[in-house]
Amino acid sequence: MTHPLLDLAPLTAGRFAAIEDRIARLLGTGQDVVVMQGEALLPLEGAIRAAAGPGTVALNIVTGPYGQTFGDWLRDCGATVHDLAVPFHRAVSAEEVRRALTEHPEIDFVSLVHAEAATGNTNPVAEIGEAVRAHGALFYLDAVASVGAEPVLPDAWGVDLCVIGAQKAMGGPAGVSAVSVSERAWARMAANPNAPRRSYLSLLDWKERWIDGGRKALLHAPAQLEMLALEACVERIETEGPRTVMARHASAAAATRAGALALGGGLEPYVREARDAAPVATTLRVPPGTDASRLVARALESDPALPLAAGGGALAREMVRVNHYGPDATPGVVESCLAALGAALAETGAATDPGAARRAVEASWADQDGANGAGLSGA
């Protein structure tokens, strides 16, 4: 007896290459795109280890926990690292990046997370890319959370290494990812004696054995389910329209902020300025004396499928995260999350107004739809 999810024919090199081409079109890039057979940490780490070494001087921008991880990898590679850390309740500015580059003219590598889903902020990559390009440094970008939710344009922004994943705004599986690589990034890797080779982490293996060979022979047997799911994610975005998908995520973020403020009970946006807020997740600060992890656990008792989480690490006591990405970027999901949080807060004695929150979500979503519709019709 055959099974559609088990009895799959091997994925051909041609199909694999076609999926890479669709990813390249989604990113609007003429760079090489390599689809990696693992969660996005695979190309994120692989790209750093390929491009960085003892002679590298890096500016590592930290606006959340992933920026901290990149700094650890860079130091482990032997690089000299200058961290530019900003409070997690805001984005980094291009001016701060320019100042750091001026203070350390020897910097030749810049690492940045586009949208930090863990802290709810998003960074102005276009402006930062302009500063990095003027300085001449190699630009490494984690766009895992942002792809699908907001523009990701490696070529226009001067990004040399741009890593994406399917599991957030693209609405797909976690077990597959991709990286776009510029020509000068390939040259940096080829000149790095410490770059992984003959390794699962190796990007150079893909360059030399896959791309340089005309993409005719795969390095190993690809995971069919994940590859087909990635293809389906891209097809769904193409069908709905990338700008429509991005508008839906922006609406979810704006509605969550508006609804949380209307709900009351002491909840307030963790990211202070709406312009710095990521469209994939809204982080909320709980009132003093409330434990965020306990609040989330109580809220999830009503519906364990709600995309709610407490902050990670030291943020677990003070931050709630509403993950409104992919299929959860809808008004119904936002309303349900706020209703559950409101009920949990009410049990602590906090005064909440679920009706006001629901009305604020509906009004915000309608306003965003109107603004997005006007923008799309005028585009």
Image (tube, grey):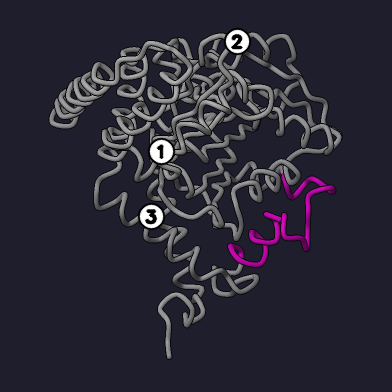
Residue 295 % position (x, y) = 52, 26
- Residue beneath disc 3: 233
User: Which one is nearer the viewer's eye here, 183 or 17?
Assistant: 17
Q: Mark 2 or mark 3: name the one nearer the start of the chain.
A: 2
Q: Quadrant of residue 199?
A: bottom right
Q: Secondary structure at mark 1?
A: helix
**Disc number lying in front (2 or 1):** 1
- Residue beneath disc 2: 96
Q: Quadrant of residue 73?
A: top right
Residues at marks 2 and 1, CA–CA distance in whole angstroms: 44 Å
- Residue beneath disc 1: 302
Q: Secondary structure at mark 3?
A: helix
Question: How would you rate the neighbour count of disc 2 (Cα within 10 Å): few for under 14, some for 14-19, many for 20 or more?
Answer: some
Amino acid type at circle 3 is Cys
**Disc number lying in front (2 or 3):** 3
User: Which one is nearer the viewer's eye here, 43 or 24?
Assistant: 43
20 sits left or right of 237 in the view: right
Residue 347 % position (x, y) = 44, 21
Residue drawn at x 51%, y 30% is 296
